[in-house]
Amino acid sequence: MIDIRHLEVAYGHARVIHDLNLTLSPGEMVFIVGRNGAGKTTLLKTIAGLLKPTQGEIVFEGRPVAGEPPDKLARSGFRFVAQDKKVFSSLSVRSNIELAAHGAGEPVEVAWKKAVEIYPKLAEFRALPAGRLSGGQREILLIGRALVGNPRLLLIDEPTEGLAAIVIEEIFRILKGMRQTVSAIIVEQNLSIVKRLADRIYVMKEGRIIREINDQSGITDSARLENYL
Amino acid sequence: MTAATDLRGFAVRPYSPWGIVRELAIVAAGLLLLSLVIKLHWMTNFMIFFILVLSFDLLYGFMGHLSFGHMLYFGAGAYGTALWLVYGGKSPLIALAVGMLAAALLAAGLGRIVMRTHGAPFALINMAFNEIGHFMIQSPLSGVTQGEDGLSCSADNIFGIINLYKDGWAFGFAAVMLLAVFALLRVLTASPYGILVRSIKENEQRVKFLGYNTFRYKWVTFVIASTVAALSGGMFTLVQGFISPRVISPFGNVDIIFAVLIGGAGTLYGALIGGTVFMLIKNFLPVLIPELATLLNMKLPQWEMWLGIVLLVIVFSVRKGIVGAVLAKWRQRPCGSTT
């Protein structure tokens, strides 16, 4: 699906990702954990085309895509849900989905139906400006929008950060529903979510992947995971 | 959630043919009301200015690109029309089309450069091109444009009947064109394309994440806004029968920006209301200030200074413009309230 080899990323002269290798198979849900400043968001931004790597390769379905612009990657099926939960706040909830549908070449009604299926309350908020949604509802809208069209790879940055427990469970339910159907790389600090959803975990520290956890006992070992945060 | 809340919250109002007709009727009624208190030839100038402000609102209000060089396209339309009338033929509609085409081609070319920038560089690069255009008209092209002396031109009647040098016909012609531009922009801004343009204003990066080549949409919007500005420039030429380099002067941009800020950027009604308030201030202060000075028997500063003060007060007291302030009040009403 995606194969990242010897990736190096820098902000000016400051290198923030060093010789990073990562793979993702079709339908796999991979989580990236690590302390603040480990380079997790930088990695997602680089895969999404927001940053150009200084070295290394990102190969998506056999095609090198490193440094391609975000719109081209989006047309290849990449979807990036950023950490800041920014929706198009002056547009209605429905228009947010419409915009994604037009971009992905999917009929608006189909896209809207899919979004409502993952979170029925969206139907209630249909005409509301998206800026008036709560943080959790915005995150759900963003995930719903990312699922419009035919997403091949979801890149989600800290989907539960700053959200109430009840909303976190809602997001867990949505992510769980996506398992096996779409490949995803998710940056997450909430270990209860990670433990229940991860097929594999990469641990990042100071711009490097220091551990790959792919056995079920390791994935569910809270005490061990806590050490990496 | 009540239906009332739904309607109030809907950020991009959908349109229907009847809805458009209703809105055009409202605008037409407003124009007729204004024409009861303002002389027809002034009203014609007002409406030409409204079209220019609407075109700028598409660029700045809807897409978020503040240009200090929009007058370049007004001037290109004005000079394109005038030059056709002088050196080409006397048909006003063909002359208008030539002016618009000239400006569209100019915008298409320059748009490839300016739309790669945003913020202050966008504003200043546009101003630089505007200044170059102003200079070209004044000096290197003075052989055909008559430079500072200006260019006189005359057109035949439209369809052999409509004489644009008569106030009534000119008023009617400007009103029809204004309503047509309003309808066009209303449909455009409520369409998926309009939603996209608004989204670019809000967060261009996120629009790219949805798979859109935003440059292409920005460029098209720039060309449309410039062509509409050229329409108003061409109409100015047809109605006045004379133009000078003033029509392409970068100083004119200040008027458009103030009008949009007064009315409220990003709403077509804001452009019309802002244009009206600005034109009223600009046209009546030069009359009122000398009269007031005589009445008070004292020397008052020139009217331009009062214009600046009045505009500053308006812009700072209603930061989102008149329409923005009214909409904000409307949205603050408790849910379910119908009054």
Image (cartoon, grey):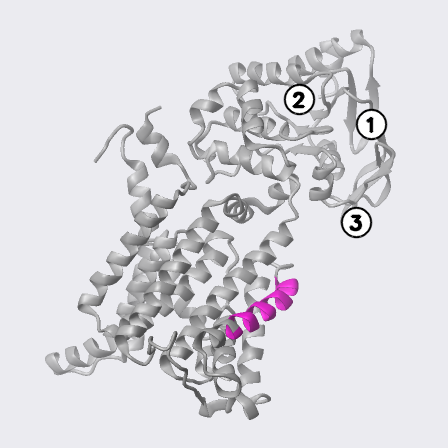
Residue shown at 28%/66% (left/top)? B310
- Tell me the amino acid under the disc marked 1: Met
How dense is the environment of label 2, judged by Cα within 10 Å: few (below 14), some, or many (20 and up)? many
Q: Which mark is residue A186?
A: none
Evaluate whether label 3 is on the same chain as label 1.
yes
- Residue range of the region highlighted in magenta in the rendering: B98-114
Q: Indicate which disc, 3 or 2, sits on the residue closer to the N terminus.
A: 3
- The answer to whether the residue labelled 2 contacts the one labelled 1, judged by CB atoms less than 8 Å apart, is no
Q: Indicate which disc, 3 or 1, sits on the residue closer to the N terminus.
A: 1
Please say if B232 is above or below B3: below
Question: Residue B2 occupies which quadrant of the picture?
Answer: top left
Q: Chain of mark 1?
A: A
Dot in front, 3 or 2: 2
Q: Which mark is residue A189?
A: 2
Which residue lies under the disc numbered 1?
A1
| Circle 3: element type | loop
| Circle 1: element type | loop
Which residue lies under the disc numbered 3?
A13
> Where, quadrant-wise, is the C terminus of chain B in this rendering?
top left
Question: Residue A69 location, x and y as percent?
Answer: 73, 45
Please say if B179 is above or below B168: above
